Image (spheres, rainbow, N blue to C red):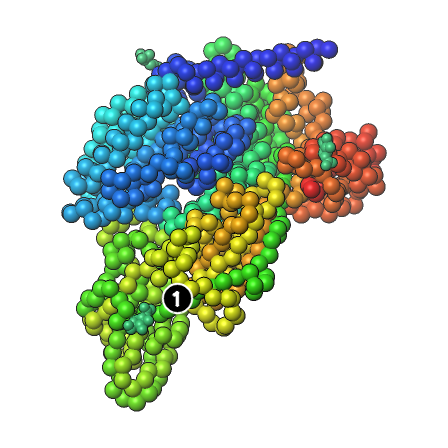
């Protein structure tokens, strides 16, 4: 009776709390300030968890569900950059529609009762083309980016003011009743400041003053800027800010972590960087406990997709797929759930954390307690084990086991609500299920680019031109053509091209002779080939391709890309007359669009070998249901893909990781790009990929797996109930048996138990097998409890499974299939 009563009154309190929260953020103006402890919203200190979700990396149709999942995951704030290059593609011409509708995005966050951190930049890095600066900035006379340079400062101030005024006119700052509680000016400027000497320092002062002068009514931050001028807050970015951050540059500023990397960006040729849920939770908790951190933003919480040509140099089209919400917006478990539990545990400590004094106590060589004790008596403790072995420690005369590299959170200085290394959340496995294959020749049409020669070009120069300055970034491609007289008879010669572009395809007299490319860590490369020359006139046609502009670095505006030198045998042709042509024919004629499609004659698909620079076209219907959709381009080489005229990004499957796998094989096709039937897919293939191997796949969570041992902590959600009433519940872990909880995605049920073992199964959800002790009823019970259900919960107990091995500590692992 009492238990139920308490639970329902909690629920009522929760509803009241949520109502109060939404009232606060949706209607009344808020006063956002800060002090040495935290941001202060309407007089209240706050511990805030934030998640980066960048509006142009998903679609407006995805925004509501991404934000709702973030909120459900215990996120208070959504952080986004502002992408200047998207909004002002030509100087003075603006675009705030579709994926660029930043106001709609912020209003969606507001509607769901969360706050916003707006990182205006305008330089943002973000592995985004030109770090978000529009390419046309380059053509402003005498401009030098990101330093004390009048033309740059003028443009930066104009843009920043425009965005601030736009937010003000929509009433989006907290000071106006909107959700924006924090803004950022510049980004990681420390990394380039040295290159500009005194002008770097004066630029930082100018930027801070300019931003503050815009009177947003909310604080500004500069991340990684130790000398951020008052009142701008310097914040930390990185993997381990609890260990690396030197702290705010004034005792009156709070410790903020603007980028806690949940993974790291991925370049073609590299593996994804996988950061475990345990490691992310450990460092977030350490920052809060040790550095008195009060704001942690996960970068990224949802990474999404670099559509079109927006990715910076060599960066994959998929962005931070390893984030708590994967590229498709699906929960990446256990990361998502483990961080949710962390947030709940930290929130239980809010009062002592925010009003108490911090004291530290050594618990051993590598073990330490950070204790926060409020005057009112509330106490919270964080027991840190920085060692590589489990440790048994005493804290306030009670014993605790601290797993290696972990932090236990004790919201009452007594009972453990959460440990960063003990994952109770289920593991999920994502699968790509082919829904349509394109393996018949009859389905495809194709158009192969003609190789232009010197006479076909539109511009000539007696030198090798810089590529991006010549293309004005209107295309990834630039043709360099050369015509010369070969006086001796037909013969073979050695061709050597040295390039500072990204990829190169070489043709001699219209015949393909070789390709070469650089890489993220190889800014230049050479192409060497033995070629046939004929007596008389010879034509060399070199296609130089870029895989994204740089995203940062000093003097980005004057970097050299493209060909540097060409030699045939020992003769250098670099100063001959070169002919230039920007883009491919299909690219400049937009043959991937409805209108442009008729500008070329599409032919039936033919399997001729070594076919370069070929466009492929086919039609398909949208897969049924609502699962996310992706193209499996595993059979292709390198290029770009369009759906109904919209680019879903560059692909590069042929540049393999050191282990021999493509860095990215699946390419997201947002549902909102699709019509129910008659969709057009167009691909530009630079190499000799085979379109017959392409499939359109549904992206689903196919398996869920749970693991729990008898000694494991219960979930944080049950902590409050267990620990109310003041009695000594230090041993509550024995009172609340944790259970294996499995949940399939909405609308799908458990269809099969792949593995179940109560006893001493070996390994965990990542690799499991029966151990020496195993209950023979394991599978039958799991099937009985879970089959046909969307979610189920099984207690690892002798009462359920019988006792297969008395006096042994047992655990339960269940792996189930969702259908
Ligand atoms: C905002 O809060 C600060 C302290 O938190 C206070 O000094 C200031 O007067 C408040 N401003 C308004 C307009 O309420
Ligand atoms: C924890 O240990 C690592 C080495 O494993 C060390 O680099 C780091 O500084 C230690 N952190 C603290 C807070 O002592
Ligand atoms: C290049 O010019 C020649 C001669 O005018 C023409 O025959 C050929 O089709 C052109 N090629 C391309 C790719 O435009
Ligand atoms: C899935 O499980 C739910 C209960 O968890 C049930 O109501 C529903 O009928 C099941 N659906 C199917 C297709 O079995």
Give above or below for 161 relative to 645.
above
Q: How many numbered markers are drawn?
A: 1
Q: Residue at left 46%, top 40%?
A: 58
Q: Residue at left 31%, top 36%?
A: 121
- Front residue of 489/560: it is 489
**What percent of the width, then of the height, locates residue 48?**
45, 25
Res. 706 image quadrant: top right
- Front residue of 733/686: it is 686
**What percent of the width, then of the height, locates residue 592?**
42, 55
**What percent of the width, then of the height, locates residue 658?**
50, 60
Res. 6 image quadrant: top right
> Do we see residue 574 in this rendering?
yes
Q: Horizontally, is 194 left or right of 504 in the view?
A: left
Q: Which residue is mark 1?
A: 449
Q: Is mark 1 within 8 Å of ligand 3?
A: yes
**What percent of the width, then of the height, locates residue 200?**
21, 40
In which quadrant will I find the N terminus? top right
Q: Residue at left 42%, top 66%?
A: 448
Give above or below for 164 relative to 404.
above
In which quadrant will I find the C terminus? top right
Give above or below for 693 relative to 393.
below
Q: Residue at left 34%, top 18%?
A: 176
The secondary element bearing badge 1 is classed as: loop
User: Alpha-carbon neighbours of circle 1 within 10 Å: few (<14), some, or many (≥20)?
Assistant: some
> Do we see residue 236 in this rendering?
no
């Amino acid at each position: 009776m009492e238990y139920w009563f308490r639970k329902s009154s909690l629920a009522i309190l929760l509803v009241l709390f949520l109502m109060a929260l939404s009232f606060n953020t949706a209607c009344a103006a808020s006063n956002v300030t800060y002090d040495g402890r935290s941001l202060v919203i309407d007089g209240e200190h706050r511990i805030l968890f934030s998640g980066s979700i960048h509006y142009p990396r998903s679609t407006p149709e995805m925004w509501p569900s991404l934000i709702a999942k973030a909120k459900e995951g215990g996120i208070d704030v959504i952080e986004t950059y502002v992408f200047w290059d998207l909004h002002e593609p030509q100087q003075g011409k603006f675009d705030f529609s579709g994926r660029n509708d930043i106001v709609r995005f912020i209003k969606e966050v507001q509607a769901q009762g969360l706050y916003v951190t707006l990182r205006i930049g305008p330089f943002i890095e973000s592995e985004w083309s030109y770090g978000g600066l529009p390419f046309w900035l380059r053509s402003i006379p005498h401009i030098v980016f990101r330093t004390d340079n009048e033309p740059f400062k003028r443009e930066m101030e104009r843009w920043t003011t425009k965005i601030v005024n736009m937010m003000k006119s929509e009433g989006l700052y907290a000071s106006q009743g909107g959700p924006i509680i924090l803004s950022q000016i510049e980004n990681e400027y420390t990394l380039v400041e040295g290159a500009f000497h005194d002008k770097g320092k004066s630029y930082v002062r100018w930027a801070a003053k300019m931003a503050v002068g815009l009177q947003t009514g909310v604080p500004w931050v500069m991340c990684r800027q130790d000398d951020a001028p008052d009142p701008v807050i310097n914040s930390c970015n990185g993997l381990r800010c609890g260990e690396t951050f030197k702290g705010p540059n004034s005792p009156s500023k709070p410790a903020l972590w603007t980028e806690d990397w949940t993974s790291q960006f991925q370049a073609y040729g590299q593996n994804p960087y996988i950061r475990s849920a345990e490691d992310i939770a450990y460092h977030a908790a350490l920052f809060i406990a040790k550095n008195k951190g009060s704001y942690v933003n996960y970068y990224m919480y949802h990474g999404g997709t670099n559509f079109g040509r927006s990715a910076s140099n060599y960066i994959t089209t998929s962005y931070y797929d390893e984030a708590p919400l994967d590229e498709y917006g699906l929960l990446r478990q256990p990361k998502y759930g483990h961080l949710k539990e962390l947030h709940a545990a930290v929130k239980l400590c809010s009062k002592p954390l925010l009003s108490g004094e911090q004291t530290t106590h050594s618990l051993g060589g590598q073990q330490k307690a950070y204790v926060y004790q409020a005057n009112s008596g509330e106490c919270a403790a964080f027991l840190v084990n920085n060692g590589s072995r489990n440790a048994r420690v005493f804290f306030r005369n009670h014993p605790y086991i601290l797993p290696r590299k972990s932090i236990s959170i004790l919201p009452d200085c007594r009972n453990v609500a959460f440990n960063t290394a003990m994952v109770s959340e289920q593991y999920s496995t994502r699968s790509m299920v082919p829904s349509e294959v394109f393996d018949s020749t009859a389905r495809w049409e194709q158009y192969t680019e003609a190789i232009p020669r010197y006479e076909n070009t539109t511009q000539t120069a007696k030198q090798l031109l810089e590529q991006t300055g010549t293309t004005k970034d209107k295309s990834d491609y630039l043709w360099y053509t050369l015509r010369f007289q070969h006086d001796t008879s037909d013969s073979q010669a050695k061709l050597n091209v040295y390039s500072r572009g990204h990829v190169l395809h070489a043709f001699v007299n219209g015949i393909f002779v070789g390709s070469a490319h650089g890489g993220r860590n190889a800014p230049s490369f050479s192409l060497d080939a033995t070629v046939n020359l004929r007596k008389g006139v010879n034509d060399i046609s070199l296609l130089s391709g870029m895989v994204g502009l740089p995203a940062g670095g000093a003097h980005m505006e004057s970097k050299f890309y493209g060909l540097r030198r060409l030699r045939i045998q020992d003769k250098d042709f670099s100063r001959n007359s070169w002919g230039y042509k920007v883009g491919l024919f299909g690219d400049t004629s937009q043959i991937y669009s409805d209108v442009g499609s008729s500008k070329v004659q599409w032919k039936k698909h033919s399997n001729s070998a070594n076919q370069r620079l070929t466009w492929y076209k086919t039609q398909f219907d949208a897969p049924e249901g609502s699962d996310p959709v992706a193209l499996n381009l595993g059979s292709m080489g390198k290029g770009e893909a369009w759906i109904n005229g919209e680019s879903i990004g560059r692909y590069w499957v042929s540049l393999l990781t050191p282990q021999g796998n493509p860095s990215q094989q699946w390419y997201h096709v947002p549902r909102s790009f699709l019509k129910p039937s008659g969709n057009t897919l167009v691909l530009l293939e630079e190499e000799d990929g085979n379109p017959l191997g392409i499939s359109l796949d549904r992206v689903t969570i196919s398996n869920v797996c749970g693991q729990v041992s008898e000694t494991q902590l219960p979930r944080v959600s049950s902590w409050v109930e267990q620990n109310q009433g003041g009695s000594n519940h230090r041993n509550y872990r024995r009172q609340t048996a944790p259970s294996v909880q499995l949940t399939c995605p909405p609308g799908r049920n458990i269809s099969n138990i792949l593995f179940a073992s109560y006893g001493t199964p070996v390994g965990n959800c990542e690799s499991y097998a029966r151990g020496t002790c195993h209950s023979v009823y394991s599978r039958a019970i799991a099937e009985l409890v879970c089959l046909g259900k969307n979610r189920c919960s099984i207690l690892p107990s002798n009462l359920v499974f019988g006792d297969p091995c008395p006096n042994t500590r047992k655990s339960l692992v269940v792996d189930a299939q969702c259908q």
